[in-house]
């Protein structure tokens, strides 16, 4: 009983300490810091390290003796209200949501840690982190949307939605991402079979869908549908970009399959929803043709119509090492980026790449090449890359800017 009491007392003290740290608004770093998440190369099945930097455009940083080690192998990251959120993907099991911020000395400190459902979608919306847990198969037909208050670091609302009823075509709606658009949330989804050894296959190869929700009530308002492209984005892949005018540009990788066979007949392209509307207009940007046959893999909106595109390396295939390009959504131009390594193994994930400069012309991207890992500065105007900070001891998985 004495041991039990001691253990409980320690846990309570720890919780109280976290609450005190979280509520202390005087001990906050004023300015901008960067968190670089790195998977160590010396071991397998290990978690990311969180490294911090003031200026990723220069210098060297290493996992050796540095950083904060995460608990759990698969972690995904986002930021809101000056806080860094680390979400554990529990592969079907509940996972931790850990919140960090920088104290006034510029040290990364943990301010909250709680258990939540493993989710497939997570995005900053208003003062919240919106997450969505989506069942992909079986009898479960209910997805759950969670609002995590970024100030409190706790779930403040939960909303169920029937994904079979949402799809309305005999398949299941599988959300690929969510994006704040004005006072609404646009959540594109794939129509998937969810069964029969063809979980992510679909009979609707050339159709795209966006569910529109009110916010913060998360009431479904309508579904926007188009047949010029296949689904937008992909699993864990943000398919929507919102420009300074509030216009939404949605890209399709044209990657729909059935029975594991590629079935999309439409092109990898962008379509558009004008600000304050919930219908597609006649805008169409055929990136696949402009790039010489390459499909879009991922996107990061930079600003003033410029967008970074991570393309599949092999033309007319959904395969090959990544290649980077700058596209102009307004002029519909496409330019491959110069100054990058001839061979790229992987690139830091764009769904949490918020490193765009204040003048919306440059951003930082982590490049993992056969001879090492570096953070490159990409210039949207010249479509060129400059090698910056070297990251030693691991593979860069993301770069996140935290500002207070």
Image (cartoon, rainbow, N blue to C red):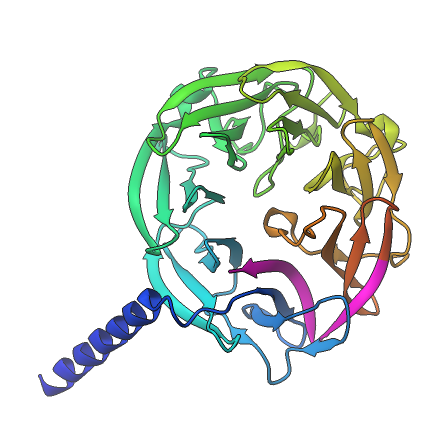
Image position of 226 (left or right of 325) = left
Magenta-drawn stretch contains 277 = no
User: 1 or 38: which is nearer to us?
Assistant: 38
Where residue 252 sits: x, y (%)?
68, 29
Query: Quarter-wise, where is residue 290 in the image?
Result: top right
- Kindly give the residue lying farthest to the left in the view shown: 1
Image position, residue 332 (x, y; %): 82, 27
Q: Quadrant of the N terminus?
A: bottom left
* Residue 114 pos. (x, y %): 33, 61
Q: Is residue 11 visible?
A: yes
Q: Where on the picture, by quarter, is residue 336?
A: top right
The verdict on residue 403 being magenta is: yes
Question: Which sits in the foreground, 191 or 273?
Answer: 273
Q: Is residue 164 left or right of residue 403?
A: left
Number of residue marks = 0
Predominant secondary structure, magenta span: strand
Q: Is residue 2 above or below residue 328?
A: below
Q: Quadrant of residue 248?
A: top right
Which contiguous range is marked in magenta?
Answer: 386-404
| Of 193 and 298, the residue lying toward us | 298
The residue at 34%/69% (across/down) is 24
């Amino acid at each position: 009983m004495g041991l039990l009491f001691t253990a409980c007392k320690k846990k309570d003290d720890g919780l109280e300490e976290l609450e005190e740290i979280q509520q202390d608004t005087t001990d906050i770093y004023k300015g901008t810091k960067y968190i670089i998440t790195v998977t160590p190369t010396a071991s397998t099945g290990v978690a990311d390290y969180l490294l911090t930097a003031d200026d990723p455009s220069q210098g060297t940083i290493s996992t050796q003796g540095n950083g904060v080690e995460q608990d759990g192998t698969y972690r995904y990251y986002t930021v809101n209200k000056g806080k860094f959120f680390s979400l554990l993907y529990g592969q079907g099991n509940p996972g931790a949501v850990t919140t960090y911020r920088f104290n006034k000395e510029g040290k990364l400190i943990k301010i909250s840690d709680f258990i939540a459902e493993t989710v497939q979608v997570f995005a900053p919306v208003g003062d919240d982190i919106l997450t969505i847990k989506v069942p992909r198969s079986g009898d479960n037909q209910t997805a759950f949307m969670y609002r995590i208050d970024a100030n409190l670091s706790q779930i403040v609302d939960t909303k169920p939605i029937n994904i079979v009823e949402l799809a309305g075509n005999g398949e299941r709606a599988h959300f690929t991402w969510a994006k704040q658009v004005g006072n609404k949330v646009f959540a594109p989804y794939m129509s998937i079979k969810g069964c029969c050894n063809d979980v992510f296959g679909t009979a609707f190869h050339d159709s795209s869908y966006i569910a529109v929700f009110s916010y913060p009530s998360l009431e479904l308002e309508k579904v926007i549908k188009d047949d010029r492209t296949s689904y937008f984005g992909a699993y864990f892949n943000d398919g929507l970009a919102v420009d300074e005018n509030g216009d939404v540009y949605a890209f399709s990788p044209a990657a729909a399959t059935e029975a594991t066979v590629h079935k999309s007949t439409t092109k990898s392209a962008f379509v558009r929803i004008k600000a304050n509307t919930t219908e597609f207009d006649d805008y169409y940007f055929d990136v696949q043709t402009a790039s010489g046959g390459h499909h879009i893999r991922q996107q990061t909106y930079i600003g003033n119509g410029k967008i970074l595109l991570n393309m599949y390396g092999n033309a007319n295939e959904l395969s090959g090492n990544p290649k980077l390009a700058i596209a102009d959504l307004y002029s519909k131009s496409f330019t491959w980026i110069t100054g990058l390594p001839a061979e790229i193994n992987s690139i830091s994930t764009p769904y949490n790449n918020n490193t765009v400069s204040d003048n919306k012309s440059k951003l930082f991207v982590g490049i993992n090449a056969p001879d090492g890992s570096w953070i490159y500065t990409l210039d949207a105007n010249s479509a060129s890359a400059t090698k910056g900070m070297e990251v030693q001891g691991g593979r860069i998985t993301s770069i996140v800017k935290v500002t207070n």
